[in-house]
Image (tube, coloured by chain):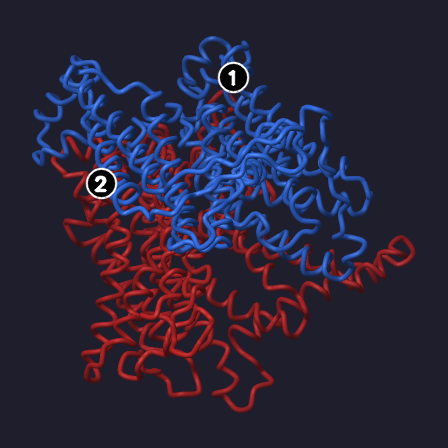
Amino acid sequence: MSDKHSPKHSSSGPAGTSRQASSAEEQTAAVVSVDTAGGAMEPSAVPATAQSGQLPGGPDTLLRKIFTGSGMVSVLAVLLALIIGGLLIASTDKQVATTSTYLFARPTDFLAAVWNAATRSYIALFQGSVFNPRGNGIASQFAPFMETLTIATPLITAGLGVALAFRAGLFNIGAQGQIIVAGILAAWVGFALELPMGLHLLLVLVAGIIGGAFWGGLVGLLKARTGAHEVILTIMFNYIALYFLRYLLNTPAFQRPGESNPISPILDPTAVYPQILGSQYRLHLGFLLAIAATVLVWWLLNRSTVGFEFRAVGANPKAAQTAGINVSRSTILVMAIAGGLAGMSGVAQVAGTEKVLTDGVAATYGFDAITVALLGRSTPWGTFAAGLLFGAFRAGAVQMQIQTGTPIDIVLVVQSLIVLFIAAPPLVRAIFGLNPRRRKPARPATSREAATTGGAA
Amino acid sequence: MSTTVSSSRSGNPQPESAGKDASAATVSAKPVSWKTPVLLTAFGLIALVFFGLLAPSQTASFGISTGSDFFQLPALEVNAFAGGLVLSILMLGLAAYAVYLKTRDKAAPGWLTVAFIVLFVAAFLIWVVGGARTPSISLAGLIAGSVTLAVPLVFGSLSGVLCERVGVVNIAIEGQLLGGAFTAAIVASITQNPFIGLLAAAVAGAAVSMVLALFSIKYLVNQIIVGVVLNVLVSGVTGFLFSTVMQANKAQFNSPPGLDIIEIPVLSGIPVIGPILFRQSLVGYLMYIAVLVVWVGLFKTRWGLRVRAVGEHPQAADTLGINVNATRFWNVTLGGAVAGIGGSFFTLVAIDSFTKEISGGRGFIALAALIFGRWNPIGAFFAALLFGFADNLQSIVTIIGTPVPSQFMAMLPYLVTVLAVAGLVGKSRGPAASGIPYVKG
């Protein structure tokens, strides 16, 4: 635990002292932002003291503190993203277009139409993701929520993989490819081998994790050995995995007999995750494993030596090297573990939700995982929560499209806006007029404050 | 970076050894690595076995002239076995020369790698065509098609050059291409004027870039994060508007008039070169101009010197009175405009309407071309051509029916990029300050 406080020792000035009073959560956020800063920039570029989310200019009123804290910024960022998304929905709404023709005669009509268009979509989104009041009985009313958990499962595990790599200062854009390779291996074990109940599923899971770990570890190896940038490597590996999958699905070993489409046989019943809440929901064992993975990553990062090394490398690779940490080994290991976590998503897809292997096995989970990890600020439980939120968006968007005709793509817009705004707290505060009053204009306040977002994702 | 790698490879990361390594690296200026000779030999042997010894004995025929040329050349006929053998022996000769240079402690010159790649591609081509059901392709068509497919890649990688040279990593090329394609389609449809569409595409690309610049320069958000997120954002916005606006009224919003192919009289009749250089759309001609302008601008003008200074050492540039962040902002914006023009190629030249995700990951290939071309406009241009070539070859070999699965052909650009960044073509090193925000003071 002591390492968490290490960035604080170097802090100075009023910001450092007033931070003592701030909540433990904020400290965690600060550490996260310090850790992710190691990614692409020199750690020295952003002073650790400047990353706390603490504002310069001395103590403010309590109310102002609440509103400018990092938790509030997250909430406001989500709100802002939803508002912009709502405006986008409204801008293409027919009723809004009609009322805008007599905007100046009756502006209330126009505003009501805008409000209606946006809220109708968001209500449908909510009903499709959490609670549907028109359902038949309580089981059916909560069916959307179960769907949310199902979709959140691969998002959480892949998100954990991305988050773990972030903490070690690596940008793992390759969850997509890791999911695919894991899916290939897991699916093959699932439909080609015949094994008893239990053992078969275990083997499927292990094969998937090994597949993902191999694909991720390969990137780590190349980076450690040649210094190639992991962003480029992972992007390229995503495509290589995808085309390899497409090739395999056209070979006799993988293609379903008598099928001309590129689709694999259905996995054996012994190889799929059991449905944990009965057969009326798609929710499967993978969700419980995702919770276990979250606990595991939390333990790894905060309680284990290896995790400490990861964070040390992420905060400052040169300092870590000097302190006797094997940076190459950490790089390879963290990418392998990240790949293994993404591999769990691949298993959740082929053994849980889909039960077959197609070239859409990874859907966009690998890319969504990046936004999930960023929104979760690279903490295990933050990633878990972000995975649930984005899972809800995904699940609800389907219902929203059916009910209101609003395209699913709006979810991408809202998702990306949330991450953008969360990454730039000063912008959010400026939009809501919450920027602190500057007492001493002589201080380089702007640059200092801007630095609060440094590497913070 | 090299010191980190070398010392960690030795496996005892003690402070003393790290320091020793660092000093050793500075004393012996540049130890010649075995990597290039070894890789060249390995690829030469692969070529000898697969393209030479195991080659089919069919004769591969390459058509050089097209019907519209003003004089006709006979088709090039090569026996696949003999051709593969000769070319692979030439490759091994080059590899041997690289080994010889290494024993004399000299690095292999750049032309050697380039010549090796050219020979390898030629041998591969002969092997692929020679093993096909109909062993005959039009070389002129293959090359012309490659250039066409490379157009958006070239614009995308130029955008990357402009951004990275000034110290901002541009992962958002994909988003800029997509934004340009969408805006070109919708504006050209409404105005019924492709030139206004082209202009609008540049503006849209610049707008995407401005968001990148704003967040990464003013708010110091990590540039890779902003880039990744911007791709998602543009994909979402264009997808949303496509579903709601364009599909509802295709005639009004998604039927842009195309940019015609402009043929330069006489010159366009020259075999092979004519179709490439003198039978292009406006966007195609702009591509050649843009490559030259960016190259001259970056390496021959005062502006370029300033740009590169900001990208390599912003503190020094600042000391000399260059406004680092302003330079970065406007360069990134310019890069976005260039990529936007590239995006308009999809909807104004290649296809006559916009569809979701029309850029199909080409922004990432452009990124690869940028690295493969070592952050140089000319290099990026040829790398993009190579990727366009692989793309075109993939569709051609599916038609003529070869033993190589088309998926592996599609995989090639990415494999080549991995090899490139892992050090096949020397150390690819980007501008020193790329990705690092500049905070004054």
Q: Please name the residue that numbered disc 1 is placed on.
A: B298
Q: Colour of chain A?
A: red
Q: Which label sits on residue A312?
A: 2
Q: What residue type is labelled 2?
A: Ala
Is residue B370 positioned above or below A392 on the image? above
Label 2, label 1: how far apart the Cα atoms are = 39 Å
Location of the C terminus of chain B (image quadrant): top left
Is residue B154 positioned above or below B351 on the image? above
For numbered disc 1, what is the local secondary structure? helix
Residue B169 percent coordinates (x, y): 45, 33
Is residue B217 positioned above or below A348 on the image? above
Choose between A57 and B199: the one closer to the eye.
B199
Chain letter belonging to callout 2: A
Is residue A223 positioned above or below A288 on the image? above
Location of the N terminus of chain B (image quadrant): top left
Residue A154 percent coordinates (x, y): 38, 65
Q: What residue type is labelled 1?
A: Leu
* Residue at screen point 66% across, 48% down: B351
